[in-house]
Image (spheres, helix red, strand yellow):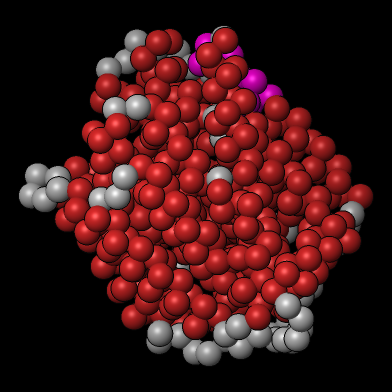
Amino acid sequence: MWGLLRGSAGFRALWGARSVSFLGDSLGLVALLLYVQASTGAALAVALLLLAGDTVPGLFGALAGAIGDRFDLRRVMVICDLVQGALTVAMAVILPPMPVLLVMVAVRSVTATVFLASSRSAMPALVNDDQLEAANSALGAGTNGLEAIGPIIAAGLFLITDVRGILLIDAATFFVSATMLSRLPKIPPVEPSGHSLLKDARDGLGYIWRAKAVRVIGIGFFAVVAFNGVDDVAMVFLAKDELHGSDSASATLYAGVGIGLIVGFIILARYAGKLTMPVLMLIGFAVSSAGNLVTGLAWAIWAALALQVIRGLGIAAIDVGVNTHLQRVVPPQLRSRVFGNLYGAIGLAAGISYVLGGLLLQHTNARTTFITAGVGGLLATVVTAIGVRRSAGGESEPRVRR
């Protein structure tokens, strides 16, 4: 992993830019959550903030991906960072009322979806094909590692500044990221379509529907997240109501997945190439779902923490497996659209899981919610495995078209 960072200036710039901006995002999210809670005192307002950031971009995934396939990817990513930085500065200066804040967060999140689709699409232009697994693992380790420590850094920053100050720091990370990305080589579109943005977006959806292997992976990923995303909601109830833990113990449980992610990415950077990516993805689906299932059976805080670390290992496998496989099999002129639609759909799946899982949690308890999520995720994994086998998606991976 470190050899790849030393040997590829383009990948090093992308890795540094995304890691810095993810750290800023983590700081900014903590600041916004505390601002909304302090200014409204309403749990619904906090939930709306999360939905604006996680779910609304899913409604625009097709358009977000189409932008990356129409223009030079370096330019798209730099502009996205500048737009996000400007919006964050505006939030810090104005500290707007709730309705305006939700709109600004939603617009920034849609812009982030454009960036995400473009950055995933750019990867094959920056590294060799046999380095894709290591590159995706290194990117995951950097972004998730800094994102995981973001709340800790935010806690320290609140000793010397306030919400405005932290949001301005968040904005600065976007401008630093844009500067780093400006060092990338130009990555022009492979085959400009000459069509309108809406037509390109429709063509991207049409490709996903026609390409059975891609469709199966997308639907399977959506289903696994729709079942398992509720763990973020249920974790605190498991810790406090079922395991009788303290506030600090509850916070510790949320670190479990982050620890597993970092460890998983480090392992996968070295060994992921020994498996085909669809197999790695399916292993990730199974391990992450089983992690939630057995977390529902945990008898102590430390046991739940260990089981969530295992879940994090599975999520790392999903990330590397899905992204690397799609980078290899999707035609370059459609790659951003596929990633835009995929991650837009995953945001919607998370929103569905928050709502339906929250209702299940309200009418049962945290253990039942975790077990149901895990069983549902495992069933989705089995169905996806059958679909991948029938679509021959796991038999071979053609080399990237450079």
* Main SS category, magenta section: helix
Looking at the image, which is closer to me, 158 or 269?
158
Is 127 left or right of 247, judged from the image as shown? Answer: right
Residue 283 seen anywhere in this rendered image of the structure: no
Q: Which residue is drawn at 54% across and 23% down?
A: 358
Quarter that holds the C terminus = bottom right
**Do we see residue 96 in this rendering?**
yes
Q: In this view, does 124 lie above or below 61?
A: below
Residue situated in front as seen by the camera: 19 or 135: 19
Magenta segment:
365-375
> x, y (%) of residue 112?
48, 62
Residue 189 sits in which quadrant?
A: bottom right
Instruction: Answer with left or right where residue 104 lies relative to residue 366.
Output: left
Residue shown at the point (79%, 42%) measured from the top left? 384
Rendering coords of residue 28 (x, y %) = 30, 52
Q: Give the residue furthest to the left.
A: 160
Counting from the top left corner in percent of width and height, residue 313 is at 52, 43
Residue 88, by quadrant, is: bottom left
Q: Is residue 55 above or below residue 181?
A: above
Image point (81%, 50%), residue name: 216
**In the drawing, does residue 166 fall left or right of residue 251?**
left
Residue placed at 36% from the left, 42% from the top?
98
Looking at the picture, does residue 186 appear above or below residue 151? below
**Where does the image place residue 195, in percent across and percent down from the top left?**
76, 81
Residue 368 colored in magenta in the image: yes
For this orientation, the residue located farthest to the right is 390
The number of discs equals 0
Q: Quadrant of residue 291?
A: top right
Q: Any magenta on residue 318? A: no
